[in-house]
Image (tube, rainbow, N blue to C red):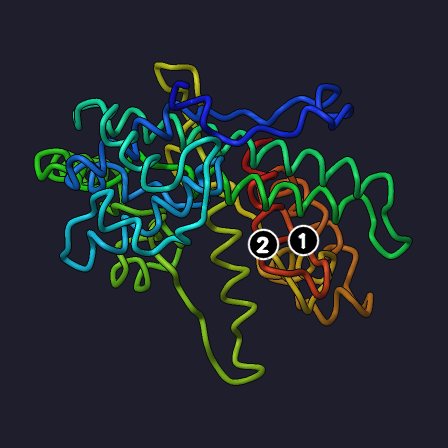
Amino acid sequence: MSLIESIRHPSDEDADFERFRQQPHNVEAEQALLGAILVNNEALYRVSDFLDPEHFFDPVHQQIFEISSKIIKSGKIATPITVKTFFDHDLAIGDLTLPQYLARLAAEATTIINAADFGQTVYDLALRRRLITIGEDLVNEAYDSAVDQPPIAQIERAEQALYEIAETGKYGGGFAPFNEAMTHAIDVANKAYMRSGHLSGVASGLRELDNMLGGLHPSDLLILAGRPAMGKTALATNIAFNVARHYKSKIRADGTTEAEDGGIVAFFSLEMSADQLATRIVSEQSGISSDRIRKGTITEEEFAELVRTAQVIQDIPLFIDSTGGISIAQLAARARRLKRQ
């Protein structure tokens, strides 16, 4: 009997089994990787930065990988002899006992050179199985959705699940060579030099703030804090408007669009409505008091100026979401959706 035949299969008595498609998997790749690890423990370090036990399809393979990883990371050697100690001695895999199966894995192992390729195969198939699970959950929720669960909430949950797969599915990361990091740093400096304001990031429109921060950068998390009624919302609104107002784009060589200056802005407001924020912006740009705009105590000339200002700024790429009680996951999903538009 070959090694692959020793893996447990569903019972032939289960007449329904053939009617269902098996989820994607590659038991041979799992066996080859585990065998390589048992023969040469260095193989583990070629896959340990992206591969976890749950990525294996077969439950026994999950256990073998997990136990082997723990043994190796504790400074010991993982071999069929040391690994079998942590299993139930009565465990059988097909017609083989566990010690026999581990010995066969090691005996039929390939070279360590292919370990990363086998690991990526196992990982990619695990992602496909996860996608299938998300799709099935999506269908089931659509059929059985509750009254208080609108379809848009289901879409946002699905988007979040897919985003998590995309983020955790990046096994190509790791160290960046210094020459690549240095080249990127020079590119950033060149952009700052070529811009009129000599900023490496996006200008906020507030000169002193830009001088301190060097502009707004994608890697930054900026927190604006202050006591109530100190102008936090007004400042944030001004920055958002300034960035959107100066937005200019250019077409890259590959046909995609890149922001040359400013940016497209998503503004999430959990307190004020979109109308209130728009009133603040129009008031700021026209020089007319927002309180007087709301009360309607403006003159005919001021109203004409209000209309003129609104016509000038109405097409800036500033998008306001004033949904109350929005979760972080929903906020992230809506931001990603806006970016795709």
Report the quarter where the N terminus lies: top left
Q: Which label number is shown at residue 298?
A: none
Q: Position of residue 123 (x, y in %)?
A: 41, 33
Q: Is residue 192 visible?
A: no
The residue under label 2 is: 267
Query: Which residue is at a point 70% across and 52% down the rendered structure image?
Result: 306
**Quadrant of the image occupied by residue 152:** top right
Q: Position of residue 39 (x, y in %)?
A: 17, 35
Q: Are marks 1 and 2 in contact (CB under 8 Å)?
A: yes
Q: Position of residue 214 (x, y in %)?
A: 26, 54
Task: Identify which amino acid the numbered label 2 is placed on.
Answer: Phe
Task: Identify which amino acid the numbered label 1 is placed on.
Answer: Asp
Distance from the alpha carbon under mark 1 to that under mark 2:
6 Å
The residue under label 1 is: 321
Query: Which residue is at a point 74% across and 45% down the rendered structure image?
Result: 154
**Label 2: element kind:** strand
